[in-house]
Image (spheres, rainbow, N blue to C red):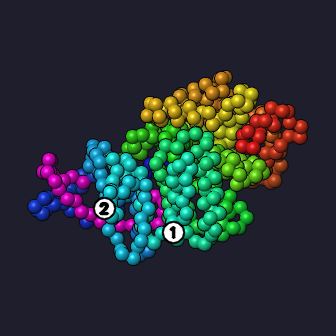
Amino acid sequence: MPGYYQLMDYAKSVENISAKDEQGRSIAVERSNDNTWLIAGIKNRSFFVKYTIRTNKQFVANSYVDSAHAYIIPENTFLYIEGHLDIPVSVSFSFSKLWKNIATGLDPVARKTNEFSAPDFDILYDCPVLIGNLVELPSFKVKGIEHRFIAYNPGNFDHILFMKNLERIVEAGASIVGDIPYKQYTFIGIGPGRGGIEHLNNTTVSFDGNGLDKPGAMNRVMNFIAHEYFHHYNVKRIRPFELGPFDYDNGNRTNLLWISEGLTVYYEYLIVKRAGLADAETLLADFNNNLNAVENNPGRLYQSLQQASYNTWSDGPFGTQGQEPGRSISYYDKGPLVGLMLDLEIRNATQNKRSLDNVMQLLYWKYYKKEQRGFTEAEFQAACEQVAGIPLTAIFEYVYTTKEIDYTKYLAYAGLKIEKQNTGSTEKTTIQKLKITRMENPTALQTAILRSWMGE
Ligand SMILES: [Zn+2]
């Protein structure tokens, strides 16, 4: 499943597969490997395949059906014909009359009920489907484009306030790149749980609105939703070269998930701050969490950000937690910190005229819009250096090697510093509590960089 960097054994859930020709005669179906079935003698003829999908795990990357709703992950549900991912496809759903709504990013087919189409299987696989008695919140438009939030079992919360906040998130996120590339966008709330997955014109998010009025809860949810939303740029369109076309059999490995995931964490914090939904202290506290996670993990001396990106298929998204703890890192922690150093270096080098936002714009217009492809590792660094106007070799050592980050140097560009406090020790390591704070007498440039970075 694109966006979920683990091999999912969806083929295991396929049962009772059978095939028939146009006259209704059975055709033999033979399993040729773990996720392929061979149907002989059908070349240039119509045929029908029927199968059952067993669902048993309620999770953002798995289809799940119960008496109250159906959450359909297309990769977990629809077989494709080998070598023909590029053919147009339509899909129709039939379900209980007691269920009233269907939410998906797929295009509805005119004059047909519950029938949708996609130009190819990649787009079909990019559009999960949620069916049931769903709650649709009042939609809003940004630059004339409609944004909807539709959810199953979303709990009790202030719908108006939530959608106002979400509108500010979309505005702040879209203003980083300055172009909205979709015709409509749908946030699909799949019920309480953990995790979300990004798509081109939609995202599925585990969502529970109960308790949103408690301190900090709205901020956490907005960070999470800003993250999934910003992914429609960073990873779906501004993407590593290796992440397309997708190889549904083997997965696509890349050294660049620290950009796709780490910089999306970086931007989720900034989006929420620039949207006016968090104050400066909350923004710095977000980075403090990553800072303490990285600096208290001995794995930072063993695995680079580049290696963590490539190895996530075996390490898991947060590094190895089991057999070999302390030998790996999470790009969700180190990625946003390197993003911060990179952004401040660019801002300082250009007298605060340019920033990482300009890098995202350059990648979007050059590689997504013009060349319609992903960027390579070298092209990413070149884009950063073009915007900065100076070589960024020292910063990229924090990506390619395990060199310790010189936070003091880069934070100073924005009039920030680090406070250290030792809070205890385990057998192997001293636990440090680190905190990013403001310098007492910043220069005019330091103040200007801090304010424009925060969107003030
Ligand atoms: Zn993500």
Percent from the top left, x then y, of residue 90? 30, 55
> Badge 1 is on which residue?
135
- List the residue tagged with mark 2: 112
Q: Nearer the viewer, residue 371 or 391?
A: 371
**In the rendered structure, which amino acid carries the disc numbered 1?**
Val
Residue drawn at the location 47% of the way across and 34% of the way down: 369
Q: Position of residue 431 (x, y in %)?
A: 76, 51
Number of numbered markers = 2
Residue 94 quadrant: bottom left
Q: Residue at x 77, y 40 (%)?
A: 451
Give x and y (percent) for residue 443: 85, 33
Relative to the observer, which residue lies in front, 397 or 336?
336
Q: Secondary structure at mark 1?
A: strand
Q: Can you name the residue that lies furthest to the top here?
A: 390
Q: Please name whichever residue, 142 or 282, is drawn nearer the observer in this view of the structure.
A: 142
Residue lying furthest right:
441
Say above or below: 322 vs 395: below
Span colored in magenta: 37-64
Cβ–Cβ under 8 Å for marks 2 and 1: no
